[in-house]
Image (cartoon, rainbow, N blue to C red):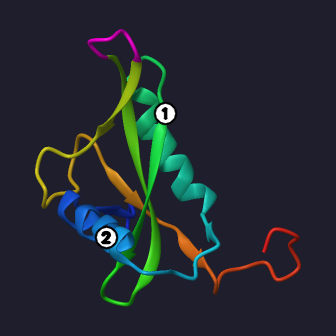
Amino acid sequence: MSQADKKITLATAKSWTANWRNAPSTSAKAFLIPIQDLQGAISEIQNQGGNPMARAYLGIDPSDNTEKLIIVGTNQETDKAGNTVYRDLLPADENTTDGGNSIWDFTRPCPPYCDDNSALS
């Protein structure tokens, strides 16, 4: 992951999301998201045109078994049946975070980054 912009490669994102789906259980209840990083992701996504939206995937980093929230931009399309669908905007190369579309990882799982006084915890 690039520490400067919190972007990860498509290959990393694919590995982490597969780890989440294969995990018997996790302890994550929520994610702490730095606003500055979120604003950076939104800034990139809002330039997509149409009705910009983001999608969040759940993943696990196998290096330390940390739960992750992975954010990507989407592109609004109409499928053959006339339904509106949102396609993930992913980098063309699995091993790059440079230019074009980005995959963002800048969250911290709760626990341990929880609010012990929150009614939602």
Q: Is residue 9 magenta?
A: no
Q: Give x and y (percent) for residue 41.
A: 46, 47
Q: Amino acid at mark 1?
A: Met
Kindly indicate the quadrant of the structure image that contains residue 5: bottom left
Figure check: 73 above or below 109:
above
Figure check: 51 above or below 25:
above
Which residue is rendered at x = 32% and y = 11% of the image?
A: 81
Callout 1: few (<14), some (14-19), or many (20+) C-alpha neighbours within 10 Å?
A: some
Sequence-wise, which precedes: disc 1 or disc 2? 2
In the rendered structure, the answer to whether residue 54 lies left or right of residue 22 reads right
| Residue contact between numbered discs 1 and 2, judged by CB atoms under 8 Å | no
Callout 2: few (<14), some (14-19), or many (20+) C-alpha neighbours within 10 Å?
A: many
Q: Is residue 81 magenta?
A: yes
Which residue is rendered at x = 38% and y = 71% of the image?
A: 20
Kindly indicate the quadrant of the structure image that contains residue 100: top left
Instruction: Classify mark 1: helix, strand or loop.
Output: loop
Q: Give x and y (percent) for residue 61.
A: 35, 79
Q: Give x and y (percent) for residue 99.
A: 22, 45
Viewer-side label of 1, 2: 2
Which residue is rendered at x = 33% and y = 53% of the image?
A: 103
Instruction: Classify mark 2: helix, strand or loop.
Output: helix
- Which residue, given by chain and number where applicable, does mark 1 sit on? 53
Q: Which residues are magenta?
A: 79-83
- Which residue, given by chain and number where applicable, does mark 2 sit on? 16
Which residue is rendered at x = 64% and y = 73% of the image?
A: 29
- Count of numbered circles in the view: 2
